């Protein structure tokens, strides 16, 4: 290493750093069907394959224990991994759980955290098959790896979107981000005046979306029942715009989405306005919604047309057409993506 | 959670905590062949199975960056997981890599860490198929999950040891622990007088064992070639005594090992004496050797008898006979195990 040169990670950004790390990584084993570059890796032989995904959750970066109940945190740690399995159109089957605990944690606190983990394991029908428990000098560390099962022909990669496919999103978007703003605002109020109780009852939906997201396995099971395989899929963890960029890059296509089609909950919208935030920006860049963003062939539209919780937000275009949001007034605005900006 | 009760984790200890966490965890899927309680979980259907294992490495607990080169650390992070795969008598095939980086890390430092990870991936022939890169408020966090392949009939569980089996250990033990003592001593010398350069050249073997352990995949490949399946196996990460306890508990047996059979390197022995440490205690409780401890049926002894790097250290006894070390003078001393004591 050239000791004299120092490049800050912030100069590269998240995606630049990941590109640098992965540039010369190749796979060797025939069982490594899909490596880096999707929501989960795909491994196995023949038609019955497995997906594998790992997520790290670090105190002070991904969660703030001053307003995050440990039980919810345990649930969320499993849910975000299940969401990555779902994004491959796979069914989760096992998880391993790595936990780093600082000495300020009591046995009762660990129990509380594990109750959430076990609740999620039951909810998503995954087996906890292993893990690692260690001490931490540096706050709570949670590392979960989830494994899922999928038929080779049923996998939805990010790379399968085709021109004229319909872009779909489940649920509503932006709520988890707005919920986080409320939680952080109420924390500041509490810190400056500990006699003030946090005013969270006013915002049950959006704070719930932040604290206890639910992976959309319901949708994956429905796909299975109706025999539908999305041409591409990703979960919305970094924000809609960022996820659309991933699909465009992997599929070598462009996208057009429509402002008036974007799913936004009323409490999310009203609270964004209350906080002087643009609701559409929250939908595009909010993140942590853990909804599914996917594309379908137009022939499959009939199957989903009447689904109460799937929204048709745009369509796939030629790569050269770029990535655009068409506003309510009909103006096409170029989309911008951002990864995390923690550094 | 009862807010009034607070039990310190140190009251339970590592194994007590893990017992508490895992007590009501059950598996549901037929593909969950083996859950918590071995070096790795076993999943799959039919005869071709997969093992999965996760290890967390946290700065300040598992490594000290003031004397750990990042490249070695990257290598070690993969090696310790491969060692868990080896302990199941499986061949590693894939890893996922989760990294939490604090802002004091430069891009060059991340490259250095990844060079070590990639070097280990090449060395053990495993594909890096995924991961998660994030920022950390709290020092470097490395979480690696390794996946391996094994035939159902070739798996060595901790639970298969039978009375009269021979207990075997690879390589030598205690070196990594003594190496760590030297590294920490030289760090203190350096801190109290920064003009003093660390005196590490005197101890190349033991410091190397601490900084760059090598998982014993060579042994696993030899087993495969000679058609030998150990009746039980575990890797030596916490110390020989602790690993023997795991085998005894899982197999419902006792053990007798012999002081004069314990493999200890000369530099380890001499340095232990120099540091006023009992060499045998270092072998029994040192940890981080990443050698293999296994048992074989007496009928397989001929196959390994002349192996230059496998040592026959004792035999399996009835459970009621207990767990004993027979000293050079012929005295039987009851073994004591300890997990980590980081809390």
Image (spheres, coloured by chain):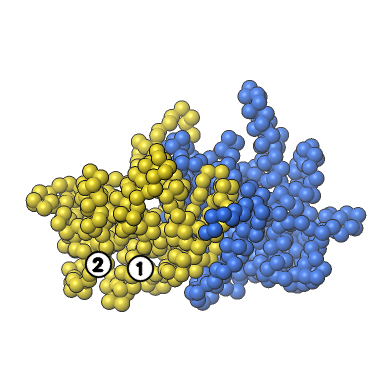
Chain colours: A yellow, B blue
User: For mark 1, does the 10 Å Cα neighbourhood hold few (<14), some (14 to 19), or many (20 or more) residues?
Assistant: many
The structure residue drawn at horizontal position 57% and vertical position 54%, both measured from the top left corner, is: B4
The chain carrying label 2 is A
The structure residue drawn at horizontal position 30% and vertical position 62%, both measured from the top left corner, is: A292
Q: How many marks?
A: 2
Image quadrant assignment for residue A123: bottom left
Q: Earlier in the sequence, mark 1 or mark 2?
A: 1
The structure residue drawn at horizontal position 46% and vertical position 37%, both measured from the top left corner, is: B105
Same chain check for tags 1 and 2: yes
Image quadrant assignment for residue B5: bottom right
Q: Is B68 located above or below residue B127 in the figure?
A: above
Relative side of A170 to A25, left or right: left
Quarter the C terminus of chain A occupies: top left
Residue situated furthest left in the rendering = A329
The chain carrying label 1 is A
Residue that mark 2 sits on:
A309
Is residue A31 in view from this perspective? no
Residue situated furthest right in the rendering = B329
**Of residues B129 and B247, the one drawn nearer to the viewer in this rendering:** B247
Q: Position of residue A104 (x, y in %)?
A: 56, 47
Residue that mark 1 sits on:
A217
Image quadrant assignment for residue A232: bottom left
Q: Position of residue A253 (x, y in %)?
A: 21, 55
Distance CA(mark 1)–CA(mark 2): 13 Å
Q: Secondary structure at mark 1?
A: helix
Residue situated furthest front in the rendering = A195
Relative side of B12 to A224, left or right: right
Q: Position of residue A106 (x, y in %)?
A: 58, 52
Q: Is B67 located above or below residue B304 in the figure?
A: above
């Amino acid at each position: 290493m050239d000791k004299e040169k120092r490049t800050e990670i912030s100069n590269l950004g998240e995606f630049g750093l990941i590109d640098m790390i992965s540039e010369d990584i190749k796979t060797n084993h025939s069982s490594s069907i899909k490596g880096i570059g999707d929501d989960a890796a795909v491994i196995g032989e023949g038609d019955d394959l497995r997906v594998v995904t790992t997520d790290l959750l670090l105190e002070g970066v991904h969660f703030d224990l001053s307003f995050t109940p440990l039980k919810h945190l345990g649930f969320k740690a499993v849910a975000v991994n299940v969401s990555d399995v779902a994004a491959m159109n796979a069914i989760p089957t096992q998880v391993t759980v790595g936990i780093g605990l600082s000495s300020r944690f009591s046995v009762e606190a660990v129990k509380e955290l594990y109750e959430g983990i076990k609740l999620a394991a039951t909810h998503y029908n995954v087996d906890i098959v292993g893990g690692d428990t260690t001490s931490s000098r540096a706050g709570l560390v949670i590392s979960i790896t989830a494994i899922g099962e999928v038929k080779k022909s049923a996998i939805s990669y990010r790379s399968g979107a085709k021109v004229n496919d319909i872009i779909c999103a489940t649920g509503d978007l932006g709520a988890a981000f707005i919920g986080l703003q409320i939680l952080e605002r109420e924390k500041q109020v509490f810190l400056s005046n500990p006699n003030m109780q946090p005013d969270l009852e006013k915002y049950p939906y959006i704070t719930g979306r932040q604290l206890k997201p639910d992976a959309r396995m319901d949708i994956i099971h429905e796909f299975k029942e109706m025999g539908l395989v999305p041409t591409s899929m990703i979960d919305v963890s970094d924000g809609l715009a960022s996820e659309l960029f991933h699909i465009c890059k992997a599929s070598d296509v462009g996208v057009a989405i429509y402002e008036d089609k974007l799913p936004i909950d009323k409490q999310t919208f009203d609270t964004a306005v209350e906080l002087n935030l643009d609701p559409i920006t929250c939908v595009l860049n909010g993140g942590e919604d853990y909804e599914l963003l996917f594309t379908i062939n137009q022939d499959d539209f009939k199957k989903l047309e009447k689904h109460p919780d799937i929204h048709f937000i745009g369509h796939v275009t030629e790569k050269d057409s770029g990535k655009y949001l068409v506003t309510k007034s009909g103006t096409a605005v170029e989309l911008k993506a951002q990864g995390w900006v923690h550094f």
